[in-house]
Amino acid sequence: MNRSPPPHDPAKNPTSSGASTPHPTATRLIGREQLEAAAEAYYAYCGAAWDDLDPKARAHYRTRMQLGLEAFVANIWRPISSAPRDGSAVLLFLHIEGRGDYIWMDLWDAQDRRWRLAPHGRPTHWTPLPGPPQP
């Protein structure tokens, strides 16, 4: 199991919509390349060419995308009660007092009614696995 920061707690790490400090996970997951791709995709949706856009306007679109992506990342972890119980692989989160935070991939065993890799684990949150890389 890998140690990782805990899921977003709005009381401890508000998103940019409520404060100016992004959630720590957002800064690791949203790099310059992801932000630029999101801003370009959003502007393309508006029907215009990114390269024709004024630099100040580009910065405005990047800021919009940064805020949206930070809010998404800050809320990426979902309560365990909503985890799929159909055998789908998911990432699970568990905090063990005195030992830290853990994230691991697992899937629900419907017959035994438990997680397969950590049957005695009591995860509190889950998130879907990301899709594979595009060629």
Image (spheres, rainbow, N blue to C red):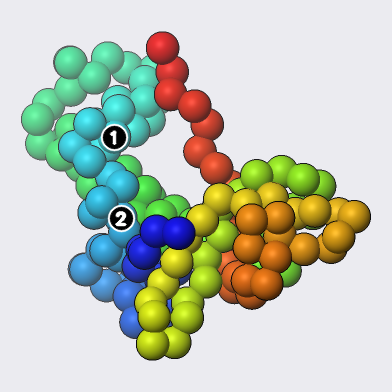
Above-or-below relation of 104 to 119 = above
Residue pictured at 41% horizontal, 72% vertical: 101
Above-or-below relation of 69 to 11 = above
Query: Along the horizontal axis of the image, is 116 left or right of 37?
Result: right
Image location (x, y in percent) of residue 119: 70, 65
Q: Nearer the viewer, residue 22 or 133?
A: 133
Residue pictured at 69% horizontal, 50% vertical: 107
- Which quarter of the figure has residue 49? top left
SS of the residue under disc 1: helix
Above-or-below relation of 96 to 64 = below
Residue corresponding to mark 1 = 34
Which quadrant of the rendered structure holds the N terminus? Answer: bottom left
Q: Which residue lies furthest to the right in this view?
A: 111
Residue pictured at 75% horizontal, 54% vertical: 108
* Amino acid marked by disc 1: Gln
Residue corresponding to mark 2 = 26
Residue pictured at 22% horizontal, 41% vertical: 31
Q: Can residue 79 be seen in this view?
A: no
The residues bearing labels 2 and 1 have C-alpha atoms spaced at a distance of 11 Å
Which quadrant of the rendered structure holds the C terminus? Answer: top left
